[in-house]
Image: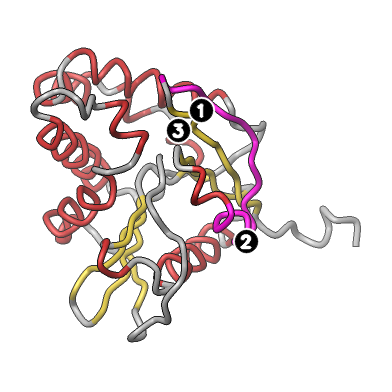
């Protein structure tokens, strides 16, 4: 659920299209999200960047998460320039909070690719983030990223905006949850309407858990 760099600085060079994608984009999504996450403080801790094989462990984890997501036919938004995928956001519906980490087949593949210690760290991290969530049904973003060469050009902002609109269409959801271990992204996320609801200590990393509330129906607001 850790979010990668989405800060905005440069102008968008070309308009992009946001649309639902499926397993046909698995390979491109794996490459994109690996590039987006391999330098994040959270993944560096979870998958032990100071130990040989770090990049292989990150690749394997991203591949397993994406493979399970698409196999379960869960929603994913893609940001495309022409036919090139430049951004991806996986969406986990509220009722699917824990299922992926409770799957024995997923755990076994993680043990074989990332190793016992990293798998245990990831499971503990996932459970700690879930424990921070407020009551109610929230969509969760397991992975979200924009290709590094397209960051800082408002594409991250465009992808988040599309996510907010998509999740707001679910009357059973109260909003979206994501988390980040890089404090430099907090100002950007706050500007997009995110509110911090908790923190988790991951070794030297302080993970921030944030929600973006869906607009409340008028009847709930008493209007």
Residue located at (55% from left, 23% from top)? 131
**Mark 2 sits on what residue?**
191
Whether residue 184 is in magenta: the answer is: no
Q: Which of labels 2 and 3 is toward the front?
A: 2
Instruction: Look at the image and give the residue range highlighted in magenta.
Output: 187-203
Residue located at (65% from left, 36% from top)? 197
Whether residue 198 is in magenta: the answer is: yes
**Mark 1 sits on what residue?**
130
> How crowded is the residue under tag 2: few (<14 C-alpha within 10 Å), some, or many (20+)?
few
Q: Are marks 1 and 3 in contact (CB under 8 Å)?
A: yes
Q: Position of residue 212 (x, y in %)?
A: 61, 51
Q: Position of residue 26 (x, y in %)?
A: 16, 54
**Mark 3 sits on what residue?**
97
Query: Quarter holding the C terminus?
Result: bottom right
Residue 117's place in the image compared with 141, above or below, is above
Q: Which of labels 1 and 3 is toward the front?
A: 1
Q: Which of labels 1 and 2 is toward the front?
A: 2
> How crowded is the residue under tag 1: few (<14 C-alpha within 10 Å), some, or many (20+)?
some
Tally of numbered discs: 3
Residue 19's place in the image compared with 173, above or below, is below
Residue 172 can be seen, yes or no: no
Helix, strand or loop at mark 2: helix
Residue 87 can be seen, yes or no: yes
Taking the image as shown, residue 159 lies to the left or right of residue 217, namely: left
């Amino acid at each position: 659920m850790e979010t990668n760099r989405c800060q905005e600085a440069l102008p968008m060079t070309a308009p992009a299209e946001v649309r639902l994608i499926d397993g046909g984009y698995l390979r491109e999504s794996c490459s994109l999200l690996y590039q987006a996450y391999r330098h994040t403080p959270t993944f560096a801790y979870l998958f032990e960047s100071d130990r040989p094989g770090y990049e292989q462990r990150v690749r394997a984890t991203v591949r397993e998460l994406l493979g399970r997501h698409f196999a379960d036919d869960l929603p994913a938004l893609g940001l495309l320039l022409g036919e090139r995928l430049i951004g991806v956001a996986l969406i986990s519906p509220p009722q699917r909070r824990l299922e992926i980490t409770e799957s024995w087949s997923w755990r076994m593949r993680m043990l074989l690719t990332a190793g016992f210690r990293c798998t245990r760290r990831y499971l503990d991290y996932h459970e700690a983030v879930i424990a921070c969530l407020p009551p109610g049904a929230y969509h969760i973003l397991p992975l979200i990223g924009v290709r590094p060469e397209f960051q800082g050009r408002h594409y991250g902002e465009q992808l988040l905006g599309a996510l907010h609109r998509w999740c707001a269409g679910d009357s059973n959801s109260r909003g979206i949850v994501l988390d980040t271990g890089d404090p430099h992204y907090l100002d950007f996320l706050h500007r997009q309407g995110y509110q911090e609801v908790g923190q988790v200590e991951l070794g030297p990393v302080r993970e921030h858990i944030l929600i973006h509330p869906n607009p409340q129906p008028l009847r709930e607001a008493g209007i």
